[in-house]
Image (cartoon, rainbow, N blue to C red):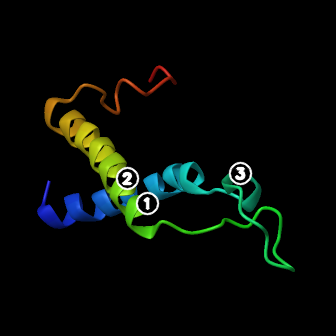
Amino acid sequence: MRWQSALAIWFLFWFLSLFFVLPFFARTSEEAGVAKVPGQADSAPVRFPFGRIVLWTTIVGSALFGLFYANFVFGWVTADMLDFTGR
């Protein structure tokens, strides 16, 4: 696999992981014990910890990419194994 392809696939895993990580860091004002600002939605987060989210997204995305790349190198699951049509 060329490095450009590996980098593009890593970015795909990174953005996919972002949607897995985001809900774990969202705290509403009720959960954080902070008073709401007038006009604020009940579901609005109190603060957005950008650095922690980027760090955890990078960790999760890199781990998933590592599994993908190990499967690419060692061939644990191939396209032939996923062909359920029997042809």
Q: Which mark is residue 56?
A: 2
- Residue at image coords 21%, 39%: 72
Left or right: 47 in relation to 52:
right
Instruction: Give the CA separation, mark 1 to mark 2.
Output: 5 Å
Q: Earlier in the sequence, mark 2 or mark 3?
A: 3
- Estimate the x, y position of residue 61 in percent, counting from the top left: 34, 51
Which residue was labeled with disc 1?
Answer: 53
Provide residue 9's location: percent of width, then percent of height: 30, 58
* Camera-side residue of 28 and 33: 33
Above or below residue 49? Residue 85 is: above
Discs 1, 2 touching: Cβ within 8 Å: yes
Q: Secondary structure at mark 2?
A: helix
How many residues crowd mark 3 within 10 Å: few (<14), some (14–19), many (20+)?
few
Query: Dot 2 surroundings within 10 Å: few (below 14), some, or many (20 or more)?
Result: some
- In the picture as drawn, the residue positioned furthest to the top comes out as 86
Disc 1 residue type (three-letter): Ile
Query: Which secondary structure lies at badge 3?
Result: helix
Q: Name the quadrant containing residue 69.
A: top left
